[in-house]
Amino acid sequence: MTPAAPARAAVLLDPAADVVELTRQVCDAESVSGGEGALADAVEAFCRDLGAYEVLRDGDAVVARTRAGRPERVVLAGHLDTVPLTDPPNLPVRRELVEGEGEVLAGRGTVDMKGGVAVQLAVARAAAAAGGAPTRDLTFVFYDHEEVASDLSGLGRLARGHREWLDGDFAILLEPTAGAVEGGCNGTLRADVTTRGRAAHTARAWRGSNAIHAAGQVLARLAAYEPAHVEVEGLVFREGLNAVAIRGGIAGNVVPDRCTVTVNYRFAPARSGAQAEAHLREVLDGFEVDVTDVAEGARPGLGLPAAAAFCEVVGTPPAPKYGWTDVARFSALGVPAVNYGPGDALLAHADDERCPVAQILECERVLTTWLLGAAPSEEVR
Amino acid sequence: MTPAAPARAAVLLDPAADVVELTRQVCDAESVSGGEGALADAVEAFCRDLGAYEVLRDGDAVVARTRAGRPERVVLAGHLDTVPLTDPPNLPVRRELVEGEGEVLAGRGTVDMKGGVAVQLAVARAAAAAGGAPTRDLTFVFYDHEEVASDLSGLGRLARGHREWLDGDFAILLEPTAGAVEGGCNGTLRADVTTRGRAAHTARAWRGSNAIHAAGQVLARLAAYEPAHVEVEGLVFREGLNAVAIRGGIAGNVVPDRCTVTVNYRFAPARSGAQAEAHLREVLDGFEVDVTDVAEGARPGLGLPAAAAFCEVVGTPPAPKYGWTDVARFSALGVPAVNYGPGDALLAHADDERCPVAQILECERVLTTWLLGAAPSEEVR
């Protein structure tokens, strides 16, 4: 006997609902990281019912793709999970009019990133109605566990176990960018910088050597550092080097023999992780540096014909993405990727998370126009 | 009915034992802070039986004094408690021959400061044999709770509740000084120095302001500071200003908005606590300084005739006491005080605490000679 799967309420996604109503339905299917199962089932059923895709499943990740043998393949990807709800819960979604913002959907996930997931579903539906892959092959990736520790990532699991499901020439990650294209992303590196001294009673401090005083030189180095602005494929990435923690001290009457500064270096995708580490070691030359974590950045890939065409449809100039996102995972697989989705990233995870309805509609319009050469049919709108 | 006092084993101090044997007996009466009762009883009985003193008791503090109306009164003071024993216990005391040190008593309390307590008892006995107060009135103070939080101090309790018991023109605290006179003591002050910034995601660090980087200027100020050497009544006190703790940081991806450096300023007794605070604020001008704790130092008082005569008998030049000791409590009461006792202060609290027998005998000889004009009788030696 295998243990019974935990019971979960069935989620229904209306195959005829417009993208705004789809956003509402996807959001109301609560799916805090680890609880994506019911929503993944509904997404899988929605895609299967479109009849135009090969639908694959791994855990709570769903992949729907065409296999029409087109010369180019585009990937649209988004995560199904959200951060936890507020207390009282910021669900179900409310449709409201907000001064200065117009009509919004308010509630957990509207920004990060179920508006994007609903756009994926609506574009998949429109492409299916147009025969599946009119100009390019398409892959829609929906995955779990993005909002938690990196090693749990559903996208990472697919990259390890089903590398071929993620094949593509260009990927769009529908993370919130308020409808702009944000290309690539900075890498991030963390390191501990330790200074050492010699403990002594503070009443006889001259017998010791103060490791916290010595850390002052590390901080001076960081404060004086001028972070680079690095142009990569036409986008200017701003780097940053910051102390994010410092700790030292044994007791109120002891000269401390050790102090550790934790630094976070955000580096442009022009540098590899190894190059970023080498640069940091150069900046902190003479100090004991222990690198604890590195995640590579991602180049924007905007020089590709597909990307250029996409940016043209969007119409506003692309910007660099400063934060680290899953575009870096695609980049690491050799698939150039950009972020493009509805919602203001500064409202992601916020208690008052909310997304303008107009941005959801605009994202759907841009992607459908780009991929199908036409706006979505009025029938579905 | 009053509750029965907790049972405690009676401690017997042999009234005829020499000072080394007395040290052994005092040490073997285990008296970790809070457990001084049995030893205080024995000290009280020992002093009463000498027949020359008014004996006073407050909690586990015992005061024995003459009231002969001499023009000058000398106080000999010491604490009865010790820090906890090691495991396995470093008691009972062992009498051993140590290479390079000669004969020692080894075990908890031998240095801090039951060698000194035994010397107090031996001097009280010698003075009683000479009539109690041949040249000066004498006060012997034995107190509890020195090795724990300052507000528990038995000496502090006497100062608050029985100020007059501590009257004197000059006090000797029998803390370990390896038989040298250590005059006065430095004061000590602790303060928190806080820098503030503005939190931001490290991916957009330019929107924030890094409080840890700002603390680098505090550390630079401390590292550049040259502590003063301050002469007070012929003794040179070395000051010290040290960061003893630093803490800052919110998360690995957040520009920190606050960093706190805890500093410890050890200041010469030429400065009052208020002057020390003013000096610290001047050194750290421009930073947010919160003084959390100040204990005044103590002037050595070596200019007094009694003190000068005492130093002459000791024979070696007096030195300043850098650490804070209870001489500061006497100083605050207007009683100049010095440290003088057997044992190396660096072995206080050590697992292998041990005191040369020769130092115990020498301290007894010096104090008896100074107070009575004669070495202790051979009969008792």
Image (cartoon, coloured by chain):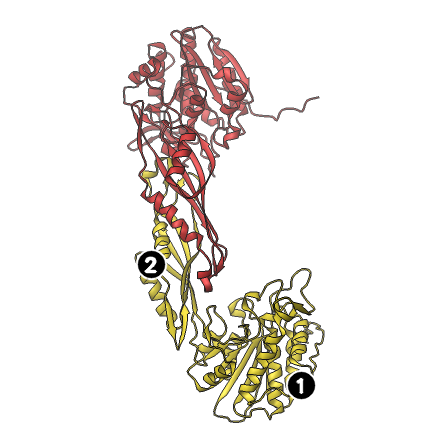
Chain colours: A yellow, B red
Label 2 sits on residue: A284
The reply, left or right, for residue A169 in relation to residue B97 is right
Q: Residue at x 38, y 7 (%)?
A: B135
Q: Is residue B215 above or below residue A322?
A: above
Residue drawn at x 40%, y 7% is B71
Residue B214 placement (x, y as % from top left)? 41, 51
Please indicate, yes or no, whether residue A2 appears anywhere in the rendered image. no
Residues at marks 1 and 2, CA–CA distance in whole angstroms: 58 Å
| Labels 1 and 2 within one chain | yes
Q: Which mark is residue B40?
A: none
Disc 1 is placed on an element classified as loop
Q: Is residue B53 visible from the viewing direction of this image?
A: yes
Is residue A130 shown above or below B293? below
Q: Which mark is residue A380?
A: 1
x 48%, y 21%: residue: B142
Residue A179: image x %, image y %?
54, 75
**Helix or strand or loop: what does disc 2 sit on?**
loop
Task: Return the disc, 1 or 2, that comes first in the chain's sequence.
Answer: 2
